[in-house]
Amino acid sequence: MRNSQRVVAGVIGGVALLIVAMGVWVRLSASQVPPLSGERATRTYDFANFRGVDISGQWRVTVERGDAWRVAVEAPAELIDRLRVGVEGDALELGYEGRGWFGDFDGDNGLGATVTMPALESLEISGTSLVRFSGFEGSRLSLDVSGAGEIRGASSRFDALTLDASGTVNVELGDVPVTDARVDLSGAGNVTLRMSGGRLTGDLSGAANLEYYGTVSEESVDRSGFVNVRRRN
């Protein structure tokens, strides 16, 4: 078997294992959840002074800029007491007690949060959460995504971006100009950036896809497997 065939087989096998593992997690989670009535519950928190957000499980989260900190979460009434919401170090943490919870994002059983904060420096996602952020400007943004998470940014700008992602992630930053970016991407993830004349560096492996708008002063990205790095007009 040629090296290219081994790479393809490895990527396909890894994605298949991820899908199987998530399916088992869903079944285990469902067995621990009480019947849901369809009623929703909301809670707000007065946490402050955090600069990042760490999310585990399956959430739909909106992170927006504001002069003060505010955290509001919503969930099925039967699950609201099982949410794990707190601050550890300089990051807000969102999770679910137990093995996790997987539901319908848009239905009555999804977990949701709206986070307002003056500055955003980091996002860390594990699981299948969808996170949207907007309105931020800063010197540095750090993103860490694993599993099948998704990040979508808008109306923001940063001097430097570092992104570490693995799995079948999707990161859409076409409306977030950055000067310099470091992207480490493995698996079958997709990343879209908007560069503003700085350096684009990183390491891509598996079947990763990296596309960017704008211009760069240097493109230095190590590649292994069936990866794609492309500038878009």
Image: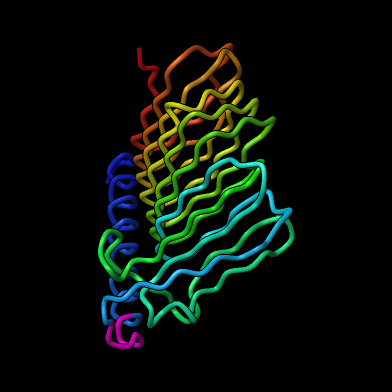
Going by the image, does 128 lie left or right of 16? right
Going by the image, does 56 lie left or right of 129? right
* Percent x, y of residue 220: 55, 22
Number of numbered discs overlaid on the protein picture: 0
Residue closest to the eye, 86 or 129? 86
Q: Image point 28% across, 71% down: which residue? A: 23
Residue closest to the eye, 7 or 213? 213
**Colouring:** rainbow
Residue closest to the eye, 146 or 93? 93
In the depicted structure, whether residue 20 falls above or below residue 193: below
Q: Image point 35% across, 45% down: which residue? A: 188
Residue closest to the eye, 121 or 171? 121
In the depicted structure, whether residue 152 falls above or below residue 81: above
* Percent x, y of residue 36: 28, 82
Queried whether the magenta region covers residue 150, the answer comes back as no
Q: Image point 27% across, 46% down: which residue? A: 1
Secondary structure that dominates the magenta span: loop
Going by the image, does 222 lie left or right of 24? right
Queried whether the magenta region covers residue 33, the answer comes back as yes
In the rendered structure, which segment of residues is drawn in magenta? 30-36
Q: Quadrant of the C terminus?
A: top left
Going by the image, does 71 lie left or right of 138? left
* Percent x, y of residue 136: 59, 34
* Percent x, y of residue 49: 74, 53
In the depicted structure, whether residue 42 falls above or below residue 9: below
Where residue 175 sits, quadrant-wise, is top left
